[in-house]
Image: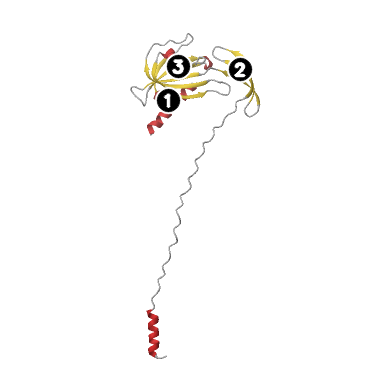
Amino acid sequence: MPKTDKAKTKAKAGKVAKKTVVAKKPAAKPSVKPAAKPKAKKKAKKTVAAPAAVIEKVVYQGPLFRVMHDKLIEPGGHPSERDVIRHNGSVVILAMDSSKSKKNPWIVMERQYRHAANQFLWELPAGKLEPGEDAVAGAQRELAEETGYAAKKWKPLVEYYASPGFLGESMQVFLAEGLVAGDAHPEDDEKIDFRLVRLSEVLKMIEKGMILDGKTMTSVMLYDRLTARKRAK
């Protein structure tokens, strides 16, 4: 091949345009919305089966309570015999004057002799309910009888059982505010001294072991805990 032809061939080869390869974008996937999460089903409340075949026998009947000897089949199917003190229930009153200080209000405290404890005890006003008596009405009655105070505002605080192993007494605690002083008229067998004590001082008395009454410790410490949470928010 002549040199000129070879040169032309090389020139043509050099003039060949380079092909640019464009990568094809993958086809967009159709957007799929995530499936909605199924709503969590509310857990069904467990129903506690009542004991079956209860045979009750009154072994003592007094003015405040009665003692029962019960034969029963417990919820687990176990046959049992129990001695139980039955009671109409009681009310406890956390009566306070917060007109001068909401953080450290005055609390109505009582001091009386308790034969079962063989000593004088510091306590909140409290008393038993009459058969069929409304709890708030009973709390208002007890506060007026023991201290002479009435309250403009009543609010339930807590309900608990002090010793449910053998005592069927429910204790309902009420917060009483907006106190109005009056004349006390306790029952003949009640010798009660009462005074107003700061919340901070009552808490110190509990810490030092000066207050041994369970309903007073439960009510005061729960109230202090709840109000501390509100202040922290």
For numbered disc 3, what is the local secondary structure? helix
For marks 3 and 2, the one nearer the N-term is 2
* Residue sitting at x 39%, y 84%: 10
Q: What residue type is labelled 3?
A: Ala
Q: Which amino acid does label 2 sit on?
A: Met
**209, 31: nearer the viewer:** 31
**90, 14: nearer the viewer:** 14
2 w.r.t. 175: above or below: below
Q: Distance between the residues labelled 3 and 2?
A: 28 Å
Q: Which residue is tagged 3?
A: 137
Q: Give the number of the mark in front: 3 or 2.
A: 3
Q: Which residue is tagged 2?
A: 68
Residue 153 in the image: x percent, y percent?
39, 20
72 w.r.t. 30: above or below: above
Q: Distance between the residues labelled 1 and 3?
A: 28 Å
Quarter the C terminus occupies: top left
Q: Give the number of the mark in front: 1 or 2.
A: 2
